[in-house]
Image (tube, rainbow, N blue to C red):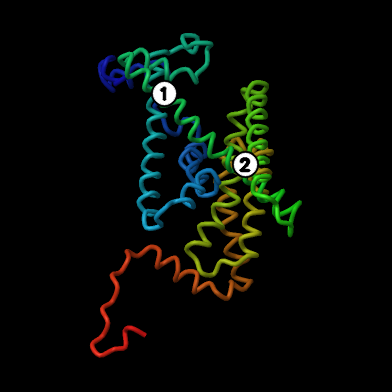
Amino acid sequence: LAVGPVGGWSVVSGELAAWDPSFLDPLALGGGALLGLVGIGLGSPGNPHILVRYMSIDDERQLRFAAVTGTLANVLMGMGAIFIGLVGRAYFPEIGLLPAQDTENLYPLLARETLHPAVFGMVVASIFAAIMSTADSQLLVGASAVVRDLYEKGIRKGEEVPQRHLVILSRAVVVALVVAAVILGWAAEELVFWLVLFAWAGLGAAFGPPLILALYWRGTTRAGVIWGVLTGATVTIIWYLTPALKDRMYELIPAFILAGLVTVVVSRFTRPPADVDEVFEILRGADRPPQPPRAPEPGGDHLR
């Protein structure tokens, strides 16, 4: 919709090349930057606000469909964001043409310039819908971590805590998280984006590899998972705080790889749970379609 009015993609690419040829060069920022851009998807398996959607699915037989659909949607959104940036640069070559000189205003401004007002309203509504969809998941995960993991299972371990008390405390934590997020976003606007990328890398590298291995490899052990989590988190922090490393590659890539390797190595030298075969049989059964009940054999005591 945005490319058509300016004469097609050839016109857009021509304007971008005339302005700066590096806009169309995927290796302009180096191979490490390109690898980091592609590998940013590795953070998905380790982020709780994404995992909780699979964990709360009503029918486990729909997990494969949900995973494929979610992956395709993420690919389309990622490619769409890249092309919106390219087309937007052709529409507005100077950042001074954007409201408040803020590149985050490009998407709604481009929609306003190219779409019917009614469709533009739907685009703006979709932005807020996407924000709320992510925010509510993260707030619920954060409140659950504080109330269930820290308070109920830690501070009040072994005690019977009234459900009403937990609900009230959860709501209070949600409000506190919202207030803290608003203050942080207001006081450190430029820092928020980098904090999001850092948190995405830390969670993805710490929990992603052990989780994937635990689901698909029978040899994964408790010690392997613990060391994998520690490795992913530690490498992410060290890589992020080392300018020479941070400038070469997004910290998620090396941290994810090393966390997976450590999980495998430690698991090789430790013993898996005794019921691992039983657990994997349950997982396999959940992946199979339901089987019709078998008819009783002739002469068998099927009423017993």
User: Label 2 vs label 1: CA separation?
Assistant: 26 Å
Look at 26% across and 78% down and name the residue there.
295
Residue at the right extreme, as displayed? 155
Residue at the top extreme, as displayed? 97
Sequence order check, earlier mark of 2 and 1 = 1
Which of the 4 image quarters holds residue 237?
A: top right
> What number of labels is visible?
2
Front residue of 241/125: it is 125
The answer to whether the residues at label 2 and label 1 have Cβ atoms under 8 Å apart is: no
Task: Give the amino acid at mark 1.
Answer: Ala
Task: Give the amino acid at mark 2.
Answer: Gly
Crowding at dot 2, Cα within 10 Å, few <14 / some 14-19 / many 20+, comes out as some
Which quadrant: the N terminus?
A: top left
Look at 36% across and 22% down and name the residue there.
122
Residue ID for mark 2: 142
Which quadrant: the C terminus?
A: bottom left
- On screen, 31 above or below 57? above
Rendering coords of residue 301 (x, y %): 32, 88
Judged from the image, the secondary structure of the residue bearing numbered disc 2 is helix
Residue ID for mark 1: 125
